[in-house]
Image (cartoon, helix red, strand yellow):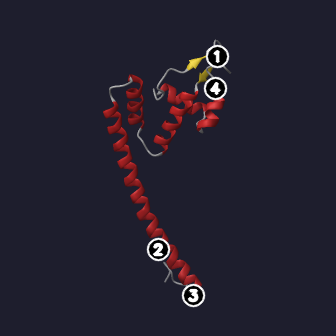
Amino acid sequence: MTSEAGVRWLGIGEVAERTGLSGHALRFYEREGLLVGPVQRTSGGRRRYTSSDVEWLEICVRLRESGMPLADLQRFAELVRHGPGNEAERLRLLDAHRRRVDAQIQALKECRSVIAWKVDVYAEHLARDEAGGLWDPTA
């Protein structure tokens, strides 16, 4: 749907499809103050979103998927809503989150290394037909 000002409005179903969030999750994001602007409504009370809302939600989805705590995401949204002048605090929030994600990536790389080593051990033993006794608790 398009308004008289030329704004293309998106319904909750379209936004859910574009962001991967369910309608329930979109309503949760709204309730928790994670959106940077108020969700507009039709005269019938149906939610309608802009492409800017979708772009913001896509950022929120990535931040949440990467493990950003809800409180940090709420604070980030609050800072964005307040407009210019708090960019340094936004940067601190994002940088702290980036460091947490980097630490998770490093930990996962270490885990993957152990898994790859164990896969190689099993593959080598199976290739030589010597798999018997590998971690055998009955031996």
Q: Amino acid at mark 1?
A: Ser
Give the vertical position of 72 relative to 107 (above or below): above
Please tell me whether mark 4 sits on a helix, a strand or a loop.
strand
Query: Which label's residue is closer to the chain start, 4 or 3?
Result: 4
Tell me, for residue 3, which label it has, or none. Answer: 1
Whether residue 74 is visible: yes
Q: CA distance from mark 2 to mark 4?
A: 49 Å
Q: Amino acid at mark 4?
A: Leu
Tell me, for residue 10, which label it has, or none. Answer: 4
Asked whether, in this view, residue 19 is left or right of residue 71, the answer is right
Find disc 3 in the rendering and name its residue. Answer: 128
Q: CA distance from mark 2 to mark 1?
A: 59 Å
Q: Position of residue 139 (x, y in %)?
A: 49, 83
Mark 2 or mark 4: which is in front? 4
Mark 4 or mark 3: which is in front? 4
Q: Position of residue 23 (x, y in %)?
A: 61, 31
Which is nearer the eye, 47 or 85?
Answer: 85
Query: Which label's residue is closer to the chain start, 1 or 4?
Result: 1
Q: Amino acid at mark 2?
A: Trp
Q: Position of residue 27 (x, y in %)?
A: 55, 27
